[in-house]
Amino acid sequence: MSAGPAPVSPRTPINLEKVSALLVDDNAQALDILSQVVSGFGVRTITRCESGEDAQAALRRATFDLIIADVHMPGMDGYELIAWLRREGPQPNRFAPVLLVTGHTRQNEVVKARDCGANFIVAKPLTPKVMLERIVWVAREDRMFIEAPHYVGPDRRFRRLGPPAGIDGRRSDDLPVELGDAQAPNLSDDEITAMLKPTKVAL
Amino acid sequence: MTAVRKLRMRNRLGALILDGSGVSFSKAAQGAEEALAAMRGGLLVSLKEIVETLVVDFGPRAAGREQAAFIEVYNRVLNVIDLAGAVPGAGIDQAAHGLCDVIDRCAMADRWDWPAVDVHLASLQLLIASPDMPEAARRNILDGLAKVARKTAAD
């Protein structure tokens, strides 16, 4: 049985004016696009960072309601930034919703995004409709926040993906996955959604 | 037994944006579409420059391209995907995704398939130069690239 939020209606009223967003991308033009899209939604308070290290400093300085970060960055990449945020980041940012964006979405990247503590991964090129759907999705979701030795972040129990590589699963339907570096074709946003949609499972 | 803590955190984002006020979802998305459309001209110029540089560095006339690192070319193609959202429907993102797939497979085989790379770069140049080309022509280009990618996978 699916536990994800219901689909968004085109008439659903949303108000992003009071949202404070942190946007992280090492490509200045990609950051411009992301900023334009987010400000086009009505967000008035936007902090831009061009590296994971700058984002860490911003997260120590201010409180954010939404974090959107690129995966591929030199130095600290998006996965490392979010893993740090979930484990060592300042509160309340530690619990803030995180969307990771990536250009070429291999299956192992979706799994890495899940395992670093991101709420969702969004495939580039960014389209306003898909980005807004994902923002509303994380705004409506009601996942527990998990703190465990091997994982800190939103509850990531998904029926099909099984436990993270190297960790024994505890459920009868956990799949024995050895993901390694998957060399699979690019995943669409619909395929990512199918992978990340939370599903209630019988324990 | 390992300690696992489960916390029920208040969703601040939800409380802020879903309070019943504001504009409709479709109007908010439209606002962002319009903001993005204003960037289209400048981003097409940037896309053209990025692909031209790729052709100079890794195209048929590039000296020493056999020594090119897979990850370097891959990361530079990602720059194309980064900007392709500003030109929706032009197929630029699909061609760039296809090129990333080809590079992934080359990396797995540890050898370049330069004809497959070249045809993707040439197609990217064409798609960027003619973002408003007839749909049938664009479909022909993308179908051709898909066949090349499948062939690369089979080799």
Image (cartoon, coloured by chain):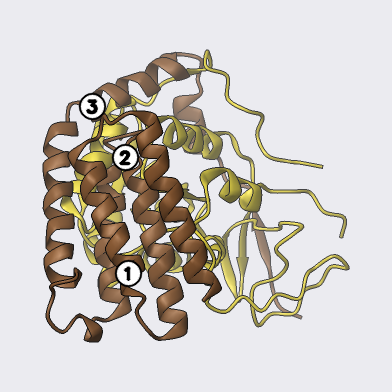
Chain colours: A yellow, B brown
Labels 3 and 2 share a subunit: yes
Given residues A140 and A95, the one toward you in this image is A140
Q: Residue at x 34, y 26 (%)?
A: A41
Image quadrant where residue A15 sits: top left
Viewer-nearest of labels 1 and 2? 1
Q: Position of residue A51 (x, y in %)?
A: 23, 62
Q: How far apart in space, not on screen, are marks 1 and 3 (Cα)? A: 34 Å
Q: How many marks can you see?
A: 3
Residue under label 2, please give it.
Answer: B85
Q: Chain of mark 3?
A: B
Q: Position of residue A20 (x, y in %)?
A: 32, 37
Instruction: Mark 2: give few (<14), some (14-19) or many (20+) Cα within 10 Å.
Output: many
Element assignment for label 2:
loop
Q: Position of residue B81 (x, y in %)?
A: 31, 51
Instruction: Mark 1: give few (<14), some (14-19) or many (20+) Cα within 10 Å.
Output: few
Element assignment for label 1:
helix
Q: Residue at x 22, y 59 (%)?
A: A26
Q: Look at the picture and state if A75 lies above or below A92.
A: below
Q: Residue at x 39, y 23 (%)?
A: B29
Labels 1 and 2 share a subunit: yes
Q: Which mark is residue B115?
A: 1
Q: Which mark is residue B37?
A: 3
Q: Chain of mark 1?
A: B
Q: Work out whether mark 3 precedes mark 2 in sequence or the reverse, and give the earlier one.
A: 3
Q: Position of residue A57 (x, y in %)?
A: 23, 61
Labels 1 and 3 share a subunit: yes
Q: Work out whether mark 1 precedes mark 2 in sequence or the reverse, and give the earlier one.
A: 2
Image quadrant where residue A36 sits: top left
